[in-house]
Image (cartoon, grey):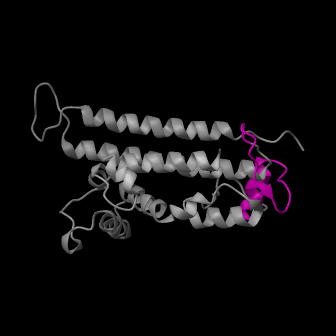
Amino acid sequence: MGRPPKVDHVKQAFLASVASSTLLVQAVLNLPSSVRVTNPPSLHPKYTRKIVGLAFMGLVASWEEFLERSLVRYLAGATTDSGYQPALKHGQADSIEHAYKVLSLDPSYQSANSYLKVSDPAWVRSRADFFFKRHSFGGLQNSADLLKHASKIRNRVAHESSKCKSDFKSTAIFFLQPANNQLSQGYSSGDLLLSPVFRHFGQNVVQLQLNHFQAYAERYSVLANQIVP
């Protein structure tokens, strides 16, 4: 068995992705905005919202990659630079490749054509509970609803299916509680992400007047620091 893999760089890469996505959104919001052609040029609001949606799609993808990379490394014996290591129940995987096979319960697992179900926080928690006596993924439970709704927002950015539209509408209603549960025509993921938070993220987020994109960036960062302390 070789040296255990590192894990801190996985968190640092994710936090860098959070910072990059946040800066992109802020830069777009700082551009002149207009529905008419202007000189100097300006960005139509619908394109601003589209860019924000795409930035969020990348943020969720980076979060899921972080979950996967940290989980497999812990199973392969990784210890953080601060000395944290989850206590294993059943023994250490021989390598990261072996950890993928163990976690997937598939001895023929190949990362090129298979994937772990890290988009489902319940799956991540159940795997962590099964393989570790104690672990740092417990915070996912308190944020489970937010993480599921993040996936629905991401899916609406990526897809035009009726299911994705329906799921996104339920998510927007969950956050906004609009009158009669009705959204304005053409309401988009970007609209929701740029809207101010007033429920579900905690009073501190409301007081800071964060929008939903910023609130998710903050929540993901907190969870990442809990998982890789």
* Magenta stretch encompasses residue 188: no
Query: As displayed, is residue 188 above or below residue 44?
Result: below
Residue 2 makes an appearance in the image: yes
Q: How many marks?
A: 0
Residue 106 makes an appearance in the image: no
Which residue occupies 72% across, 41% down?
Answer: 80
The residue furthest bottom is 180
Q: Is residue 176 left or right of residue 134?
A: left
Question: Magenta stretch?
Answer: 80-106
Q: Is residue 85 left or right of residue 122?
A: right
- Give the percent coordinates (x, y) of residue 29: 26, 37
Q: Is residue 88 left or right of residue 62?
A: right
- Give the percent coordinates (x, y) of residue 170: 34, 70
74 or 109: which is nearer to us? Answer: 74
Query: As displayed, is residue 129 above or below residue 154?
Result: below
Quadrant of the snapshot with the N terminus: top right
* Magenta stretch encompasses residue 91: yes
User: Residue 41 is drawn in which quadrant?
Assistant: top left
- Give the percent coordinates (x, y) of residue 179: 19, 70
The residue furthest right is 1
Quadrant of the snapshot with the C terminus: top right
Query: As displayed, is residue 127 above or below residue 37?
Result: below
The residue furthest top is 40
Which residue occupies 73% across, 39% down?
Answer: 6
- Give the percent coordinates (x, y) of residue 116: 64, 59
